[in-house]
Amino acid sequence: MGHFLFFLLAIICVGSVLGMIISKNQAYNALLLVLAFASLGGLFGLLDAPFIATVQIIIYAGAIMVLFIFVIMMINLRLGLPPEKKKWTLYFSLGVAVVLIVELILSVKGAFSLFENSSMEKIGGPTDLGRLLFTKYLYPFEITSILIIAALVGAIVLVKKKEKE
Amino acid sequence: MIPLSYFLILSIILFVLGTIAFFIKKDLITMFMAVEIMLNAANLAFITFARSANSLDGQVIVFFIITVAAAEAVVGLAIILLIFRQKKTIKSEDLTLMKG
């Protein structure tokens, strides 16, 4: 059952990202990305992280992607995107991808042996995570709230400036 | 139980696909989405390691990454909207202001 769920979610996730690379329509890209993020949320659930799975679905698949879709609707490129002329980026990106995949696999190979003798006891849900957030990670948590305020004010200032002129 | 190495390999695949999408795509919004994919691949790796170490620290870091990604998306999309208002385009090829 676990294996079946993992492969189902992994195939949905990778398939929708591949579809995003192939598709030219931005609205479809955003919807495919919602699918990818939702299936990633399921994968987080499989890894015994129920709170992060919920946050992933609510914030990523919900809030952030709705923001993307709003902006796509506001921009509304009627003409659509013309076909790309330059092909060198394709070859360049494939080269970068091959280098990156080799590098990542080499660097991660050492971790595989680490996984074999890891104990599989249950780790905590929202309660333990919240306790950790408000004790050990209290300062990062507070700094994050300042960051969000700064981002909010920054976004409003950026978009508002044009309207005054 | 699913081997944790599968999750790590999926994370690598997602990260590389995000990189490819970032280079191939020409409109700023889709490039931005590719960055989000890479962030999520990193999240998956963090949660996998948190699972293997039986520690919640990895999950807390993923929580912070998601928060920072939300802030980043807001500012990034505001900038893209501003570029569109001024230049009437969001194709990265047409934005050559900083080209030497």
Image: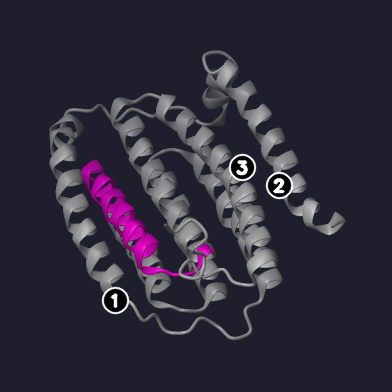
Residue at mark 2 to residue at mark 3: CA–CA distance:
9 Å
Q: Do the numbered discs 3 and 1 sit on residues whose CB atoms are within 8 Å?
A: no
Residue A159 or B62: which is nearer the viewer?
A159
The magenta stretch spans which residues?
Answer: B1-28
- Colouring of the image: one colour
Q: Give the amino acid at mark 2.
A: Ala
Q: Residue furthest top?
A: A135
Q: Is residue B27 magenta?
A: yes
Residue A143 coordinates in the image, percent (x, y)? 62, 23
Q: In the rendered image, which quarter is residue A164 located in?
A: bottom right
* Residue hosting label 2: A155
Identity of the residue drawn at 47% across and 27% down: A124
SS category of the residue bearing label 3:
helix
Q: Give the amino acid at mark 1.
A: Lys
SS category of the residue bearing label 1:
loop
Identity of the residue drawn at 55% across and 38% down: B68
* Residue hosting label 3: B71
Q: Give the amino acid at mark 3.
A: Ala
Judging from the image, mark 1 belongs to the subunit labelled A
Q: Is residue B46 magenta?
A: no
Left or right for A110, reference A24: left
Identity of the residue drawn at 34% across and 33% down: B51
